[in-house]
């Protein structure tokens, strides 16, 4: 499945810094949401959805990081098999320790 041009479209959402898009289910199938800070219009997060409209992938471009341990951008995937109410969102680590999965764009 190609994620560069989601067939369900790309939706832009504007909101407060540090608050990600809360929609993890019920979104247009095979779509992406781009979440921007409403004050600066800076891209904060992208979220991809699967055939069922469930979140499958996040790319965090910026968020609160008081420990300064997160490189930006970095990716997370959703583990729906572990908890269907609000599944864990582990950080992506590629075969060469990369933090971005280049298959999502």
Image (spheres, helix red, strand yellow):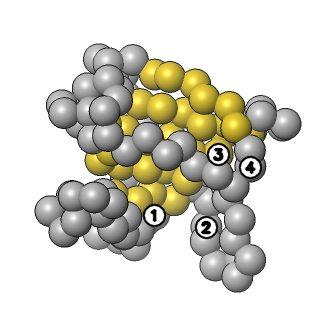
Which mark is on residue 99? 1
Query: Does the image show residue 30?
Result: no
Mark 1 and mark 4 in contact? Answer it, CB < 8 Å.
no
Which is nearer the N-term, disc 1 or disc 4?
A: 4
Mark 3 and mark 1 in contact? Answer it, CB < 8 Å.
no
Mark 3 and mark 4 in contact? Answer it, CB < 8 Å.
yes
Q: Residues within 10 Å of mark 2 (few under 14, many from 20)?
A: few
Query: Does the image show residue 27?
Result: yes
Closer mark to the observer between disc 3 and disc 1: 3
Which mark is on residue 44? 3
Mark 2 and mark 1 in contact? Answer it, CB < 8 Å.
yes
Gap in Å between the C-alphas at discs 1 and 4? 22 Å
Image-based side of 80 in relation to 16, left or right: left
Which is nearer the N-term, disc 4 or disc 2?
A: 4
Closer mark to the observer between disc 3 and disc 2: 3
Which is nearer the N-term, disc 2 or disc 1?
A: 2
Query: Which element type, helix, strand or loop, lies under badge 4?
Result: loop
Gap in Å between the C-alphas at discs 4 and 2? 17 Å
On the image, the x and y values in percent for residue 78 come to: 30, 57
Which mark is on residue 42? none
Residue 84 against residue 97 in the figure, above or below: above
Residue identifier under label 2: 71
Query: Which element type, helix, strand or loop, lies under badge 1?
Result: loop
Residue identifier under label 4: 17
Closer mark to the observer between disc 4 and disc 2: 4
Q: Residues within 10 Å of mark 3 (few under 14, many from 20)?
A: many
Which is nearer the eye, 38 or 77?
38
On the image, the x and y values in percent for residue 5 come to: 36, 21
At horizontal 84% and vertical 36% (from top left) the residue drawn is 39
On the image, the x and y values in percent for residue 27 come to: 34, 29
């Amino acid at each position: 499945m190609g994620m560069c041009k989601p067939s369900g479209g790309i939706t832009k959402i504007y909101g407060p810094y540090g608050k990600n898009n809360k929609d993890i289910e019920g979104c247009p199938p095979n779509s992406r949401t781009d979440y921007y800070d409403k004050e600066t219009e800076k891209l904060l997060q992208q979220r991809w959805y699967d055939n069922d409209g469930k979140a499958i992938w996040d790319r965090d471009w910026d968020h609160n990081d008081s420990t300064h341990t997160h490189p930006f951008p970095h990716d997370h995937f959703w583990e729906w098999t572990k908890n269907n109410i609000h599944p864990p969102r582990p950080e992506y680590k590629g075969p060469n320790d990369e933090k971005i999965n280049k298959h999502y764009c």
